[in-house]
Image: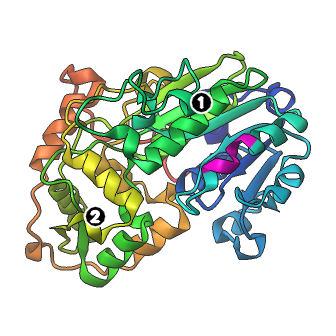
Amino acid sequence: MKLNLVEDLKKCFGMKKTSIDQTGRILVVDGHDVIGYRVVDQLAYMDYPLIRVGVKNTDDFYVKRWEDNGYIIERVNFDFVDESTYDIALEDVKTVFVTTPMKPANWDAHFVNFLDACHRAKVKKIVKLSFYHAIQSKIENHPRQCFGSEDSTAEPGYEIPSVPFVKKHALCDGDLILRNEFNATIIFATHLMSNVFRNGFERRGLMKNHEFYGASQGKQVNYVSPNDVADIAIKALFDESRTREAHNVLGPFPLTDEEVASLLSERLHTAITYVEKPLDFFDEDTAALEKIKASGMEENFPRGDYKKVMNISPQSFREYLRDTVRMSPVEKKVVGAFAPMNLDELKVRTEKETKKELEVIDDGEGVEVKEVGSITEKVGTQMAQ
């Protein structure tokens, strides 16, 4: 059964017999990240033989599921702010998938030197995860020169260039765009659904107080499944067209944070309350992202490129929460911490999202689909069990 699933997955992601020669050894940084974890996990399941994971401390990096399944995954020390780790991590690497950290604050200052190290190592392809709003920098010029100038294409009133997290991504995207020696793909994703489990303050709020925190002021937010982002990344890793491209990866429809709390209540069998917090509750980057949410600019986003690239609709928030097989250890830990309650105790209204799910399937053509999930669910569930 696994053999059939693996072959279906390889076909879906464009992995061929020639892929090892073309793609070579793949370095994924950072393997602790929810996207990096999923990319490594899927590559290992497909028996890709040349996987290297860069993490800050290999002694602390242990994934029980990978060990139990006997996955062959090389681990190396990698730290964006420790440039002495670059050359060793990149040795004999042809392809790199980069997810960047929120902390430390100065990681972006090292990105040019990381690209220089990739050049020395003769890396052929770089796939970088970015943030959707970073597109609004002027990518045909060098963002380090024009960012925040009158030529900036940021929408007026939202002060996107002033958001530190967005600005860092825009600058680093610009650095990558200018490096013609690489076959580069940039993935512009919106807010990850997994943030409700991954961010420290969210995780503590959920587990201790059964609360979900934000400052979105009742506006709808575009959340994207980390499974969809990882799938697009894997597709890009095996793309042999040698093109330089970008993909916008968005959720199927926007939700208010109150609706997210209801979906968490449904999945965790525990009444989760959304609590609006003042901006000074959050760190600088998170507060700036909450301001973007509160602007309402995400209520009418385009559909994104996921269905065009993967030939399947993007996951809804409910589908992401159900797809626990692909969750990272951090996400699973939070989900597993909740004991089921009597459903009569829950005040959950999910009809609105259910209606939206049916509307977005097949671009609103009215086709009823019982379950539409990730690529894994498309070719067979429980792929990794």
Foreground label between 2 and 1: 1
Residue behind mark 2: 267
Q: Is residue 95 magenta?
A: no
Q: Residue at x 21, y 30 (%)?
A: 300
Residue depicted at 16% across the width and 78% down the height: 342
Residue 111 percent across, percent down from the top left: 68, 44
Boundaries of the magenta span? 108-112
- Is residue 231 among the parts visible in the rendering? no
Task: Evaluate whether residue 382 shows in this view.
Answer: yes
Is residue 103 left or right of 311 when viewed as pictured? right
- Kindly state the secondary structure of the residue where label 1 is placed: helix
Question: Which residue, given by chain and number where applicable, does mark 1 sit on?
Answer: 174
- Does dot 2 land on a helix, a strand or a loop? helix
Distance between the alpha carbons at the discs numbered 2 and 1:
40 Å
Q: Which sits in the foreground, 220 or 292?
A: 292
Amino acid type, mark 1: Gly
- Name of the residue lying farthest toward the bottom: 208
Residue 16 point in image, percent of width and height:
75, 26
Q: Residue at x 47, y 34 (%)?
A: 188
Corner quadrant of residue 79: bottom right
Percent position (x, y) of residue 81? 71, 59
The residue closer to the viewer here, 123 or 231, is: 123
Depth check, front residue: 322 or 137 = 137
Characterize the magenta stretch by its predominant secondary structure: helix
- Say above or below: 268 vs 14: below
The circle drawn on residue 25 is none
User: Counting residues from the N terminus, which is met first, the one under dot 2 or under dot 1?
Assistant: 1
